[in-house]
Image (cartoon, grey):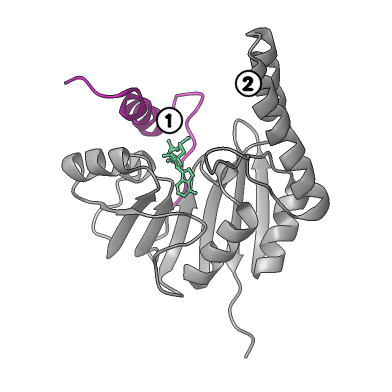
Amino acid sequence: MQVSDRIQYHLDELEVASDPSSPYHVQPKFEAGDQYILDIGCGIGQTLIASQLGNRRLVIGMDIELESLVYGRKHYDSIRYINGNAEHLPFADNSFDKIISRVAMPYTDIPRSIAELHRVLKPGGSIWITLHPLSKSLQQFSDSARQLSAKGVLFRSYAIINGCCFHLFGRLFRWPVGNVIESFQTRGSMARCLRHCGFSDIEFENRRYFKCTATKSLPKS
Ligand SMILES: C[S@@+](CC[C@H](N)C(=O)[O-])C[C@H]1O[C@@H](n2cnc3c(N)ncnc32)[C@H](O)[C@@H]1O
Protein backbone atom coordinates (compact mmCIF):
# COMPACT_ATOMS: atom_id res chain seq x y z
CA MET A 1 0.00 0.00 0.00
CA GLN A 2 1.29 3.47 -0.91
CA VAL A 3 1.67 5.76 2.11
CA SER A 4 2.56 9.45 2.42
CA ASP A 5 6.14 10.58 3.17
CA ARG A 6 5.10 11.42 6.73
CA ILE A 7 3.72 7.93 7.41
CA GLN A 8 6.74 6.36 5.71
CA TYR A 9 9.00 8.37 8.07
CA HIS A 10 7.13 6.96 11.08
CA LEU A 11 7.22 3.40 9.67
CA ASP A 12 10.99 3.74 9.19
CA GLU A 13 11.27 4.96 12.79
CA LEU A 14 9.22 1.94 13.92
CA GLU A 15 11.86 -0.30 12.30
CA VAL A 16 14.59 1.61 14.14
CA ALA A 17 12.66 1.34 17.43
CA SER A 18 12.24 -2.42 16.92
CA ASP A 19 15.92 -3.02 16.09
CA PRO A 20 18.33 -2.64 19.04
CA SER A 21 21.29 -2.95 16.66
CA SER A 22 20.29 0.20 14.73
CA PRO A 23 22.65 3.14 15.41
CA TYR A 24 19.55 5.35 15.84
CA HIS A 25 17.86 3.02 18.36
CA VAL A 26 16.85 4.69 21.63
CA GLN A 27 14.00 3.36 23.72
CA PRO A 28 12.67 4.20 27.20
CA LYS A 29 12.58 1.62 29.98
CA PHE A 30 9.26 0.87 31.66
CA GLU A 31 8.68 -0.48 35.18
CA ALA A 32 5.82 -2.82 36.13
CA GLY A 33 4.27 0.08 38.07
CA ASP A 34 4.05 2.20 34.91
CA GLN A 35 0.41 1.44 34.20
CA TYR A 36 -0.78 4.79 32.82
CA ILE A 37 1.56 5.80 30.03
CA LEU A 38 1.57 8.79 27.66
CA ASP A 39 3.74 9.35 24.57
CA ILE A 40 3.82 12.99 23.43
CA GLY A 41 4.48 13.50 19.71
CA CYS A 42 3.93 9.78 19.16
CA GLY A 43 3.65 9.78 15.35
CA ILE A 44 1.96 6.45 14.55
CA GLY A 45 2.95 5.23 18.04
CA GLN A 46 6.28 3.70 17.02
CA THR A 47 8.05 4.03 20.39
CA LEU A 48 5.09 2.50 22.26
CA ILE A 49 4.56 -0.29 19.72
CA ALA A 50 8.22 -1.33 19.85
CA SER A 51 8.11 -1.25 23.66
CA GLN A 52 5.60 -4.15 23.63
CA LEU A 53 3.84 -2.90 26.73
CA GLY A 54 1.41 -5.81 27.09
CA ASN A 55 -1.55 -5.37 29.39
CA ARG A 56 -1.03 -1.93 30.89
CA ARG A 57 -4.10 -0.11 32.14
CA LEU A 58 -3.82 2.77 29.66
CA VAL A 59 -1.36 3.53 26.88
CA ILE A 60 -1.98 6.80 25.06
CA GLY A 61 -0.20 8.16 22.00
CA MET A 62 -0.77 11.88 21.45
CA ASP A 63 0.27 14.05 18.52
CA ILE A 64 -0.77 17.31 16.85
CA GLU A 65 -0.68 15.60 13.48
CA LEU A 66 -3.96 13.87 12.56
CA GLU A 67 -2.81 11.75 9.63
CA SER A 68 -0.38 9.78 11.81
CA LEU A 69 -2.97 9.21 14.52
CA VAL A 70 -5.53 7.95 12.01
CA TYR A 71 -2.96 5.52 10.58
CA GLY A 72 -1.99 4.37 14.07
CA ARG A 73 -5.58 3.83 15.18
CA LYS A 74 -6.24 1.71 12.08
CA HIS A 75 -3.19 -0.53 12.51
CA TYR A 76 -2.30 -0.77 16.23
CA ASP A 77 -5.14 -1.45 18.62
CA SER A 78 -3.10 -1.65 21.85
CA ILE A 79 -2.74 2.15 21.86
CA ARG A 80 -5.34 4.87 22.31
CA TYR A 81 -4.62 7.77 20.00
CA ILE A 82 -5.48 11.33 20.94
CA ASN A 83 -5.04 14.54 19.00
CA GLY A 84 -3.52 17.22 21.20
CA ASN A 85 -0.75 19.73 21.77
CA ALA A 86 2.12 19.28 24.25
CA GLU A 87 1.62 22.85 25.42
CA HIS A 88 -2.03 22.27 26.42
CA LEU A 89 -2.39 18.61 27.35
CA PRO A 90 -6.01 17.38 27.20
CA PHE A 91 -5.70 15.34 30.43
CA ALA A 92 -6.58 15.80 34.09
CA ASP A 93 -3.92 16.56 36.72
CA ASN A 94 -1.97 13.58 38.15
CA SER A 95 -3.05 11.11 35.43
CA PHE A 96 0.11 9.27 34.31
CA ASP A 97 2.84 7.12 35.85
CA LYS A 98 5.21 7.67 32.94
CA ILE A 99 5.41 10.19 30.11
CA ILE A 100 7.76 9.71 27.20
CA SER A 101 8.55 11.95 24.25
CA ARG A 102 11.09 10.98 21.60
CA VAL A 103 12.28 13.79 19.29
CA ALA A 104 9.21 16.00 19.83
CA MET A 105 10.03 18.40 22.71
CA PRO A 106 12.45 20.49 20.55
CA TYR A 107 9.42 21.41 18.39
CA THR A 108 7.41 22.75 21.33
CA ASP A 109 7.46 25.75 23.64
CA ILE A 110 9.45 23.78 26.23
CA PRO A 111 8.68 25.81 29.39
CA ARG A 112 4.94 25.38 28.70
CA SER A 113 5.26 21.71 27.69
CA ILE A 114 7.35 20.80 30.73
CA ALA A 115 4.84 22.57 33.01
CA GLU A 116 2.08 20.51 31.37
CA LEU A 117 4.04 17.25 31.71
CA HIS A 118 4.44 18.03 35.40
CA ARG A 119 0.74 18.79 35.82
CA VAL A 120 -0.54 15.55 34.27
CA LEU A 121 2.13 13.30 35.84
CA LYS A 122 1.33 11.57 39.15
CA PRO A 123 3.58 12.52 42.09
CA GLY A 124 6.50 10.10 41.95
CA GLY A 125 5.92 9.55 38.21
CA SER A 126 8.74 9.97 35.73
CA ILE A 127 9.47 11.42 32.30
CA TRP A 128 11.81 10.23 29.56
CA ILE A 129 12.47 12.70 26.75
CA THR A 130 14.99 13.17 23.97
CA LEU A 131 16.35 16.60 23.07
CA HIS A 132 18.41 18.36 20.41
CA PRO A 133 21.97 19.38 21.30
CA LEU A 134 23.56 22.49 19.75
CA SER A 135 25.67 20.23 17.50
CA LYS A 136 22.51 19.00 15.75
CA SER A 137 21.30 22.54 15.04
CA LEU A 138 24.76 23.52 13.74
CA GLN A 139 24.76 20.44 11.49
CA GLN A 140 21.33 21.40 10.10
CA PHE A 141 22.56 24.96 9.56
CA SER A 142 25.59 23.82 7.59
CA ASP A 143 23.44 21.37 5.55
CA SER A 144 21.17 24.30 4.56
CA ALA A 145 24.19 26.46 3.74
CA ARG A 146 25.71 23.70 1.58
CA GLN A 147 22.39 23.37 -0.29
CA LEU A 148 22.40 27.16 -0.78
CA SER A 149 18.93 27.30 0.78
CA ALA A 150 18.40 30.88 1.98
CA LYS A 151 15.12 29.89 3.65
CA GLY A 152 16.83 26.97 5.39
CA VAL A 153 19.73 29.15 6.60
CA LEU A 154 17.27 31.73 7.96
CA PHE A 155 15.17 29.13 9.77
CA ARG A 156 18.21 27.30 11.16
CA SER A 157 19.63 30.64 12.39
CA TYR A 158 16.32 31.26 14.17
CA ALA A 159 16.42 27.80 15.83
CA ILE A 160 19.99 28.43 17.05
CA ILE A 161 19.18 31.92 18.39
CA ASN A 162 16.04 30.49 20.04
CA GLY A 163 18.14 27.81 21.79
CA CYS A 164 20.50 30.57 23.02
CA CYS A 165 17.48 32.53 24.38
CA PHE A 166 16.29 29.40 26.17
CA HIS A 167 19.72 28.87 27.68
CA LEU A 168 20.22 32.49 28.75
CA PHE A 169 16.68 33.64 29.65
CA GLY A 170 14.58 30.45 29.88
CA ARG A 171 12.29 31.69 27.09
CA LEU A 172 11.45 30.54 23.56
CA PHE A 173 9.90 32.39 20.62
CA ARG A 174 7.78 31.21 17.68
CA TRP A 175 8.88 31.53 14.08
CA PRO A 176 6.73 34.40 12.74
CA VAL A 177 5.01 32.22 10.12
CA GLY A 178 2.93 29.04 10.56
CA ASN A 179 2.83 28.69 14.35
CA VAL A 180 6.18 26.85 14.28
CA ILE A 181 8.72 26.69 17.08
CA GLU A 182 12.11 25.00 17.26
CA SER A 183 15.25 25.20 19.39
CA PHE A 184 18.25 23.30 20.65
CA GLN A 185 18.62 22.53 24.35
CA THR A 186 21.48 22.45 26.83
CA ARG A 187 21.72 20.52 30.09
CA GLY A 188 21.65 23.85 31.94
CA SER A 189 18.53 25.23 30.22
CA MET A 190 16.65 21.95 30.69
CA ALA A 191 17.72 21.42 34.30
CA ARG A 192 16.62 24.96 35.23
CA CYS A 193 13.28 24.53 33.44
CA LEU A 194 12.61 21.10 34.98
CA ARG A 195 13.54 22.24 38.49
CA HIS A 196 11.38 25.35 38.13
CA CYS A 197 8.39 23.15 37.21
CA GLY A 198 8.92 20.85 40.22
CA PHE A 199 10.97 17.95 38.85
CA SER A 200 13.82 16.27 40.70
CA ASP A 201 16.26 13.38 40.04
CA ILE A 202 17.13 15.11 36.74
CA GLU A 203 19.62 13.09 34.68
CA PHE A 204 21.08 13.54 31.21
CA GLU A 205 22.88 11.26 28.81
CA ASN A 206 24.40 12.55 25.60
CA ARG A 207 25.73 9.67 23.54
CA ARG A 208 23.96 8.78 20.32
CA TYR A 209 20.93 10.68 21.64
CA PHE A 210 20.59 13.55 24.09
CA LYS A 211 18.29 11.96 26.67
CA CYS A 212 16.80 13.35 29.84
CA THR A 213 14.91 11.65 32.67
CA ALA A 214 13.30 13.27 35.71
CA THR A 215 10.79 12.57 38.46
CA LYS A 216 7.84 14.57 39.76
CA SER A 217 8.65 15.12 43.41
CA LEU A 218 6.31 13.66 46.03
CA PRO A 219 4.49 16.25 48.14
CA LYS A 220 6.33 17.11 51.37
CA SER A 221 4.52 15.61 54.39
C1 LIG B 1 10.37 13.81 14.66
S1 LIG B 1 8.73 13.24 14.97
C2 LIG B 1 9.02 12.00 16.21
C3 LIG B 1 7.96 10.93 16.22
C4 LIG B 1 8.20 9.81 17.22
N1 LIG B 1 8.10 10.28 18.59
C5 LIG B 1 9.55 9.15 16.99
O1 LIG B 1 10.38 9.19 17.88
O2 LIG B 1 9.80 8.63 15.91
C6 LIG B 1 8.06 14.58 15.94
C7 LIG B 1 6.59 14.39 16.24
O3 LIG B 1 6.19 15.39 17.18
C8 LIG B 1 4.92 15.89 16.79
N2 LIG B 1 4.77 17.24 17.39
C9 LIG B 1 5.40 18.38 17.04
N3 LIG B 1 5.01 19.40 17.81
C10 LIG B 1 4.11 18.90 18.70
C11 LIG B 1 3.33 19.46 19.75
N4 LIG B 1 3.38 20.76 20.05
N5 LIG B 1 2.51 18.65 20.45
C12 LIG B 1 2.43 17.32 20.15
N6 LIG B 1 3.13 16.72 19.16
C13 LIG B 1 3.96 17.50 18.44
C14 LIG B 1 4.96 15.88 15.27
O4 LIG B 1 3.67 15.93 14.69
C15 LIG B 1 5.70 14.56 15.00
O5 LIG B 1 4.83 13.47 14.89
Is 103 positioned to the left or the right of 78 in the image? right
What are the residue bounds of the magenta stretch?
A: 1-29
- Quarter of the image where one finds residue 13: top left
x and y, in percent, of residue 5 in the image: 34, 22
Indicate which disc residue 20 carries: 1
- Give the secondary structure at mark 1: loop
Q: Is mark 2 within 8 Å of ligand 1?
A: no
Q: Which quadrant is home to the N terminus?
A: top left
Q: Amino acid at mark 1?
A: Pro
Q: Residue at x 37, y 40 (%)?
A: 43
Position of residue 204 relative to residue 13, above or below, is below
- Labelled pair 1, 2 in contact (Cβ < 8 Å): no
From the viewer's side, name the closer residue of 153 and 60: 153
Q: Nearer the viewer, mark 1 or mark 2?
A: 2
x and y, in percent, of residue 133 in the image: 69, 35
From the viewer's side, name the closer residue of 19 and 101: 101
**According to the image, label 2 marks what residue?**
151
Residue extending farthest to the bottom is 221
* 24 drawn magenta: yes
Q: Residue at x 47, y 52 (%)?
A: 100
- Give the secondary structure at mark 2: helix
Indicate which disc residue 125 carries: none
Q: Residue at x 39, y 34 (%)?
A: 17
Position of residue 152 relative to residue 51, above or below, is above
Is residue 216 visible to us here? yes
Q: Amino acid at mark 2?
A: Lys
Label 1 packing within 10 angstroms: few (<14), some (14-19), many (20+): few
- Quarter of the image where one finds residue 55: bottom left
Q: How far apart are labels 1 and 2 at the CA level? A: 36 Å
